[in-house]
């Protein structure tokens, strides 16, 4: 079906396992993304096949990535000091706390 060794492949497999997509939908979206140079996620979203909530649910339930409502958290100063601002901006991350 997908290249399960990549993160996107694992997410796509998890979406199929969760019953949110069929294998055929994944193959079609991957082909379109490859042909257009776009991302599979964008293709799926444009087709209305998955929502951001679907992706968050799969990432949390199937892949162990917890959902965090960042409006409910104040980042700990010690966590912010662990990651240089430029690196955080480059990768689109916000350290909230240190575990």
Image (cartoon, rainbow, N blue to C red):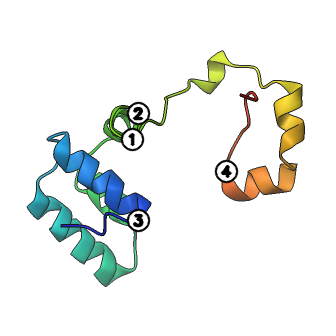
When the figure is inspected, residue 55 is found, relative to residue 33, above or below; the finding is: above
Structural crowding at the residue carrying mark 1, measured as other residues with C-alpha within 10 Å and reported as few (<14), some (14–19) or many (≥20): few
Indicate which disc, 4 or 2, sits on the residue closer to the N terminus.
Answer: 2
Residue ID for mark 4: 92
**Callout 3: few (<14), some (14-19), or many (20+) C-alpha neighbours within 10 Å?**
few
- The picture places residue 53, in percent across and down from the top left corner, at 36, 34
Q: Label 2, label 1: how many angstroms apart (C-alpha)?
A: 6 Å
The reply to whether the C-beta atoms of the residues labelled 1 and 3 are less than 8 Å apart is: no
Mark 2 vs mark 3: which is more N-terminal?
Answer: 3
User: CB of mark 3 within 8 Å of CB of mark 4?
Assistant: no
**Spatial distance from mark 1 to mark 3, Cα to Cα?**
13 Å
Label 2 belongs to which residue?
Answer: 60
The quarter of the displayed image where residue 34 is located: bottom left
Q: Measure the C-alpha gap from mark 4 to mark 1.
A: 20 Å
Q: Secondary structure at mark 1?
A: loop
Q: Residues within 10 Å of mark 4 (few under 14, many from 20)?
A: few
Question: How far across and how far down the image is residue 66, in percent?
Answer: 49, 30
- Percent coordinates x, y for residue 31 in the rendering: 23, 76
- Residue 51 at least partly seen: yes
Q: Pointer 3: what residue?
A: 6
Q: Is residue 23 left or right of residue 12?
A: left
């Amino acid at each position: 079906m997908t290249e399960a060794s990549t993160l996107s492949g694992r997410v796509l497999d998890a979406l199929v396992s969760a019953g949110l997509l069929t294998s055929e939908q994944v193959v079609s979206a991957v082909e379109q993304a490859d042909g257009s140079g776009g991302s599979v996620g964008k293709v799926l979203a444009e087709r209305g096949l998955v929502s951001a909530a679907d992706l968050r649910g799969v990432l949390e339930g199937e892949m162990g990535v917890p959902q965090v409502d960042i409006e409910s958290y104040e980042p700990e100063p010690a966590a912010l000091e662990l990651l240089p601002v430029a690196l955080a901006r480059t990768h689109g991350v916000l350290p909230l706390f240190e575990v």
